[in-house]
Image (spheres, rainbow, N blue to C red):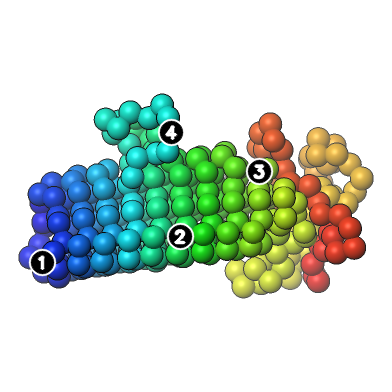
Amino acid sequence: MISSSSHDIHPTAIVHPRAVLGEGVRIGPYAVIEGPAVIGAGCAIAAHAIITGYVRMGENNSVGYGAIIGGDPQDHAFDPATESWVVIGSHNRIREYVTIHRGTAPGSETRVGSHCFLMGGVHLAHNVTVEDRVILANNALLAGHVQIGTGVFVGGSAVFHQFVRIGRNAVIQGNASIGKDVPPFLIGCRTNRVGGINTIGLRRAGLTAAQRQEIKRAFLLLYKSGLNTTQALAAAKEQTWSELGETFFRFVAGAKKRGICELRHGRDGGDEGED
């Protein structure tokens, strides 16, 4: 169902009768919108893009050429009759040839927040969660159930193992291979390593010098005190932390079997930032 006549739909585009289009949606040549997709007001869908089936999209999103949103998971056990979703917030830029697959279990969803930028060739597998203000550079590949926190920047061609978590305001260097959790505020690099604190990113996010010092104190306790992770968590409980420090250690405590990325060693390893 088209909720308003104020659309710009190219005559070669195909829009299913069950699809719901908000006010002012623009759909380019040869794009396909299948039902029961819901496209919010002000969205722009470029030529040859496909929005397939169970997709709910907020307002003012742009979807680039050839992107495919809502495709079936790449899961041998998946039943195509399953009703699962892709849920996207508002004000996102989803560039050309991005692929976002829907959830693998009935009623589950792959979720993208708001004000995100997914550059060309990015892949989000089933049940991925990307929170607000995340940037994923070209060809970043996220396997199933990966969680990306608010304000994260991921460099080009970085790859992520399923179920990995990346904490808020972290940065992942290009070409990194991440199979363990990266704690908030840090730099993920190489293969399952962290290289220090994301100092530049924290400044850009508006964190004060005092807040950055708190993060540095947490980082030093976890990675440079000589304690293992369990011991560092116990030591952290004996200290007083602000919300940022508590966020850091709560994330670390929530790491599952694979644990957290280790500190990069060597001549250029372990930069804890200028602050």
Kindly indicate whether the residue at mark 2 contacts the one at mark 4 (C-beta within 8 angstroms). no
Quadrant of the rendered image containing residue 235: top right
Q: Position of residue 153 (x, y in %)?
A: 58, 62
Q: Residue furthest left?
A: 5
**Which residue in the structure is indicated by mark 3?**
179
Q: Relative to residue 160, is residue 5 depicted above or below?
A: below
Mark 3 vs 4, N-terminal side: 4
**Hey, what amino acid is under mark 3?**
Gly
**Which residue in the structure is indicated by mark 4?**
75
Which secondary structure, mark 1? loop
Q: Badge 2: few (under 14), some or many (20 or more) residues near its Cα, within 10 Å? A: many
Q: Nearer the viewer, residue 262 or 238?
A: 262
- Disc 1 to disc 4, how far (Cα)? 35 Å
**Which residue in the structure is indicated by mark 2?**
121
Q: Badge 4: few (under 14), some or many (20 or more) residues near its Cα, within 10 Å? A: few
Kindly indicate whether the residue at mark 4 contacts the one at mark 3 (C-beta within 8 angstroms). no
